[in-house]
Image: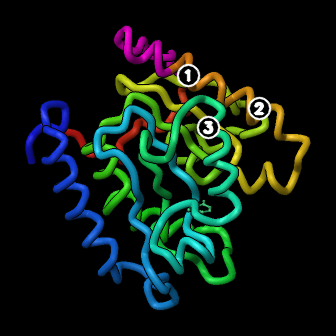
Amino acid sequence: MTDPKVMSLDERRAALDVISKEVRACAKCELHSGRTLAVPGAGRPDAELMFIGEGPGYHEDQQGLPFVGASGKYLGELLALIGLTRNDVFITNVIKCRPPANRDPLPGEIDTCVPAYLNRQIEIINPKIIATLGRFSMGLFFPPDTRITKVHGQPKRADGRIYFPLFHPAAVLRNLNLRPAMEEDFKRIKTLLTEAQQQAVVETPKPDDDPPFKQLSLF
Ligand code: URA
């Protein structure tokens, strides 16, 4: 594969389409047997900002698109707050198929799905900012005992990009007290985008227990 840093828009789109086709036909874990449609992700193939949610819910499973239910409507409102639309970003999930009764993803499902699909999507899109939505997505890039209530809205700079942990929109819809914090965190994305566009990202010093990002295969 061409180094994503020098890929054209069309090359990125084509490479993402290959992954989407694989996701739609995937039978690597048991979730495939209960799904209506797998949900690979959607948005700009060269997005500077990528959102990673947890996994498809009912509406996403029906439509094959990420964040199209109540959480998605709220995500759209948050994006509008900072002058963006879904077409300006790339939105995907840790796992690509809906778990039964919307239960949490199992460790085995995450370990199977992330290297097969999400890590490749990240490599191709090569976003400047990865905004994680909820604890499962945050758990891919932050140490295991990280509390979302403590670190939301605090950017971590590593691998030449910014990882930005956010509450899951569904959690905010369930607990409206989180709304002001979520909206403040979103507004910070604007500043972070300017930072990432203007200068090389200076890494945040790593604590000893930080995951080594080995899940991202390097060239
Ligand atoms: N919640 C998620 O985590 N992802 C979706 O796509 C929809 C709801």
Q: Nearer the viewer, residue 101 or 181?
A: 181
- Where is residue 151 shown, x and y percent of the image? 70, 31
Quick check: is the Cβ at mark 1 less than 8 Å away from ligand 1?
no
Secondary structure state at the residue bearing disc 2:
helix
Mark closest to the chain's N terminus, 2 or 1: 2
For the residue carrying disc 3, how many other residues have a C-alpha within 10 Å: few (<14), some (14-19), or many (20+)? few
Q: Using residue 161 as the reference point, say whether residue 34 is left or right of it.
A: right
The answer to whether 26 is drawn above or below residue 168 in the figure is below
Per the model, the C-alpha gap separating discs 3 and 1 is 12 Å
**Residue at image coords 76%, 32%:** 150
Q: Using residue 101 as the reference point, say whether residue 5 is left or right of it.
A: left
* Residue pointed to by mark 3: 80
Q: Nearer the viewer, mark 3 or mark 1?
A: 3
* Residue pointed to by mark 1: 190
For the residue carrying disc 2, how many other residues have a C-alpha within 10 Å: few (<14), some (14-19), or many (20+)? few
- Where is residue 77 shown, x and y percent of the image? 67, 44
Task: Please give the range of residues in magenta.
Answer: 193-207
**Residue at image coords 39%, 28%:** 128
Q: Label 1 near label 2: C-beta < 8 Å?
A: no
